[in-house]
Amino acid sequence: MTAPLHDERRTSSGARLPDTQQGMRRRNLSRVMHTVAAHGPLSRAAVASHIGLTRAAVSTLVDELIRSGLLDELGPERPGRVGRPGSALAVSARGPVGIGAEVGVDHLAACAVDLRGEVRARVTRPAPNRGRSPVPVLEELMLLVEQVSAEARAAGLTPAGLAVAVPGLVARGTRTVVRAPNLGWHGIDLGRLVSTEMPLAVDNEANFGALAELWLGEETPDDFLHVSAEIGIGAALVVDGQVLRGTHGFAGELGHVPVRPNGPACPCGGHGCLEQYAGEEAVLRVAGLDPGAERSELLAERAAAGDAAVRRALRGAGEALGIALTGAVNLLDPQAVVLGGALSRLAPWLLPALEHELTDRTAGRACGVTVSGLGPDGPLLGAAHSVARAVLDDPVGVSAGAGAGPGR
């Protein structure tokens, strides 16, 4: 799904652009870029019709974007249109590219996404990161970032910024991981440890996963609760097309909602947290299986083959998820709940118990539960797309040579 055009006074990160003549010009450049990215190739006349400006005004904006290397003219539009054919415009296949990276508990990944939304380079590497010092982990991550950046440059693209997804709490407006229990990280400032000349943003993986679902998902509404899981379980609430971050940036810690207060200890310091019943390692433990690199794949294969212990463990996980989600749904009233990450692979065996709990426990009308088509790729894609969309939001920064990074 292509997300609708954002509020023309704001960027996709929610920042408000100034109501000045220069601010109006920047907004209009952004509107042209978003329109061509969403609906192109388009003629100048078609762009003008989409955004409600005169053709002359749009032509001036388009000429500036072509000079900046952000738009390309493809030649006359296809035949069959009434009147003189215009020159079709498309987002350039060269120019800026967003770099996304992900620190997982057992893997590292990086990718490059161009302004058309296409992945131009990608690499993933297994890495047992639990309990490791952040320094070597981030050094290995930056080797992957350098690899995809080099591939992008070889294709005529220029990295515009780097966004890193992490499985932990990130203080709002900073690049500091306050707590990542499944990594064992506390108070880690990635801005000091990551060596890069690119603008850098850091965010929780669930937030990036939710943004990927908003921007790339099929028929995703503007208001939904996105839940994803691997070893940990995270959630993000999207309201009117924006991630609700909370005062400190910690909103969405669904995995540490207690579903059974007297339950087992959790690395966060609590007891009976959702992760202890619905996280991948918890489900493997209940099913009597050893954790491995392909946890969700193993569970899905065993469940599909009729393994009674695995199916029983997944029913229990679905029940725990339903209990935790009931509180969130009753409090927030989202239009939909979207299961992403590893949960998307396991949805056939989680959903019956999960939906049963939601139906029985929701005070009002239970919202629908859908399954993401992005699966575990959501956080990485969301990180890279956040940088690419920041360029669409503020093309002036690129044309002025300032680069573009994901807003906070």
Image: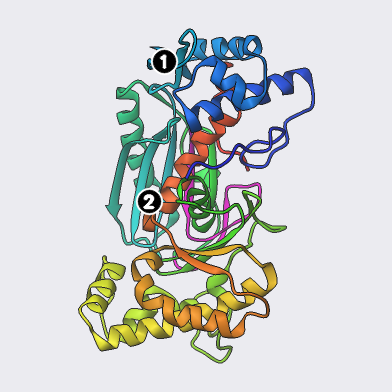
Give the magenta part as a residue range.
Answer: 161-182
Circle 1 sits in a helix, a strand or a loop, which is it?
A: loop
* Residue 159 marker: none
Tally of numbered tags:
2
Real-space Cα separation, disc 2 to disc 1, in angstroms: 52 Å
Reading the image, the residue beneath label 2 is 136
Residue toward you, 185 or 315: 315
105 on left or right of 268: left
- Say what amino acid the circle numbered 1 marks: Glu
- Say what amino acid the circle numbered 2 marks: Pro
290 on left or right of 270: left
When asked about the image quadrant of residue 293, the answer is bottom left
The extreme left residue here reads: 305
Q: Residue at x 43, y 76 (%)?
A: 351
Circle 2 sits in a helix, a strand or a loop, which is it?
A: helix
* Residue 77 marker: 1
Q: Residue at x 39, y 58 (%)?
A: 104
Up/down of 170 relative to 131, above or below: above
236 on left or right of 149: right
